[in-house]
């Protein structure tokens, strides 16, 4: 497939959207789409002092975030939301916009996210199926969105677009870069803005996150997962991570989660341990952060699962 074919595919999504609109009955309630730029106005994000318990966090090998109608969906994006939609942009946020073209209104009313803000889109209907990614992206046919609706016809789907900070590519230690004081505070402020209980999102008890999309932003995925877990728990929400068949990550994260739950670890304790990891020269590759965290626990709290993780990570 040529590198221009995905651009033709983008046009198909918008053409199909207008075809669908032209066939709607005139008396059908259309509902509305809402765009909110939520800004965290606090001076400091002191989650490392939080006594909130770590809430349930589930890891799914199958499924997609856009199918989770009963959850607050979070999508990794760039600061210029959909900014590359009309050019070469093929990230997760652009793909979501192609499936639900009405979200392109963000280009006019709330395009840019600064270090303290995120963008929430509520009520966007999906019109098309998407297959492939990057240069293999293609329009895969019509989609009838069966998400629940409000009385006025508005869809209840809610998406929080967050722009994770990309670690400095010149810094050889991703953990150090992500957990420097400025970077960590920014990530926590972003997550707090996305997951705090708002009038329009209070009915969502869980947050759904596509881990592959966050992985595209580079950095240490263990750190990203633990920050998401801390932020969702502090907001009183559970977490559902979709990891696309990454069995290794699922096994280690769930073992760690079970150990921490059994010993009543809090959001503050989690973040204190993760922050301490930034001061060490952790071994490269998968497992360094998880292993360090387990080593911070008193030896009396270790069980067979923790010994298995420590020896096999």
Image: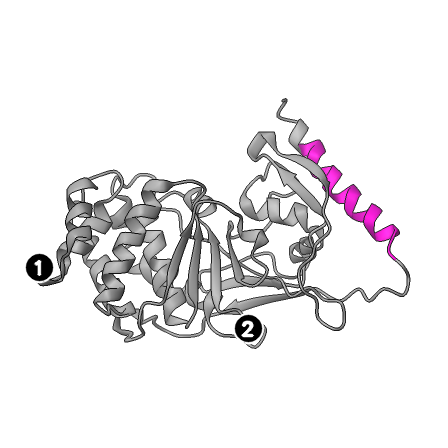
Q: Which residue is mark 2?
A: 203
In terms of sequence position, does the residue under pointer 1 or pointer 2 come before the other?
Answer: 2
| Quarter-of-image position of residue 53 | bottom left
Residue 83 in sight: no
Mark 2 element type: loop
Residue 233, above or below 139: below
Residue situated in front as seen by the camera: 234 or 163: 234
Task: Give the x, y percent position of residue 144.
Answer: 73, 51
Residue ID at (82%, 67%):
29
Residue situated in front as seen by the camera: 175 or 18: 18
Q: Which residue is mark 1?
A: 299
- Mark 1 and mark 2 in contact? Answer it, CB < 8 Å: no
Q: How many marks?
A: 2
Report how far apart the C-alphas of labels 1 and 2 lie in the structure.
40 Å
What coloring was used for the rendering? one colour
The magenta segment is: 7-24
Q: Would residue 197 appear left or right of 86 to someone viewing this image? A: left
Residue 29, above or below 283: below
Q: Quadrant of the C terminus?
A: top left
Q: Would residue 253 appear left or right of 24 to someone viewing this image? A: left
Q: Residues within 10 Å of mark 1 (few under 14, many from 20)?
A: few
Residue 196, above or below 123: below
Q: Which mark is residue 191?
A: none
| Quarter-of-image position of residue 303 | bottom left
Q: Quadrant of the N terminus?
A: top right
Residue ID at (88%, 51%):
23
Mark 1 element type: helix
Q: Residues within 10 Å of mark 2 (few under 14, many from 20)?
A: few
């Amino acid at each position: 497939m040529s590198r221009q074919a995905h651009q033709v595919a983008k046009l198909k999504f918008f053409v199909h959207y207008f075809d669908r609109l032209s066939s709607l009955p005139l008396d059908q309630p259309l509902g509305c789409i809402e765009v909110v730029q939520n800004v965290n106005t606090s001076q400091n994000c002191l989650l490392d002092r939080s006594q909130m318990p770590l809430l349930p966090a589930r890891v799914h090998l199958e499924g997609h975030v856009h199918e989770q109608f009963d959850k607050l969906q979070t999508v990794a994006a760039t600061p210029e939301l959909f900014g590359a939609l009309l050019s070469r942009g093929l990230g997760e946020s652009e793909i979501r916009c192609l499936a639900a073209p009405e979200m392109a209104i963000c280009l006019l009313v709330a395009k840019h996210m600064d270090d303290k803000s995120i963008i929430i889109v509520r009520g966007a209907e999906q019109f098309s199926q998407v297959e492939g990614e990057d240069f293999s992206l293609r329009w895969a046919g019509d989609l009838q969105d069966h998400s629940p609706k409000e009385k006025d016809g508005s869809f209840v789907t809610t998406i929080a677009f967050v722009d994770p900070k990309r670690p400095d590519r010149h810094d050889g230690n991703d953990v150090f870069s992500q957990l420097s004081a400025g970077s960590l505070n920014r990530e926590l402020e972003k997550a707090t803005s996305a997951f705090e209980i708002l009038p329009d999102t209070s009915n969502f008890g869980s947050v759904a996150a596509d881990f592959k999309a966050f992985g595209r932003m580079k950095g240490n995925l263990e750190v990203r997962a633990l920050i998401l877990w801390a932020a969702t728990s502090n907001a009183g929400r559970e977490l559902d991570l979709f990891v696309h068949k990454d069995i290794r990550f699922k096994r280690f994260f769930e073992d760690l989660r079970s150990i921490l739950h059994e010993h009543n670890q809090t959001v503050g304790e989690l973040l204190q341990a993760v922050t301490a990891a930034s001061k060490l020269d952790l071994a490269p590759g998968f497992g360094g952060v998880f292993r360090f965290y387990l080593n911070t626990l008193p030896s009396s709290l270790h069980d067979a699962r923790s010994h298995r993780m420590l020896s096999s990570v």
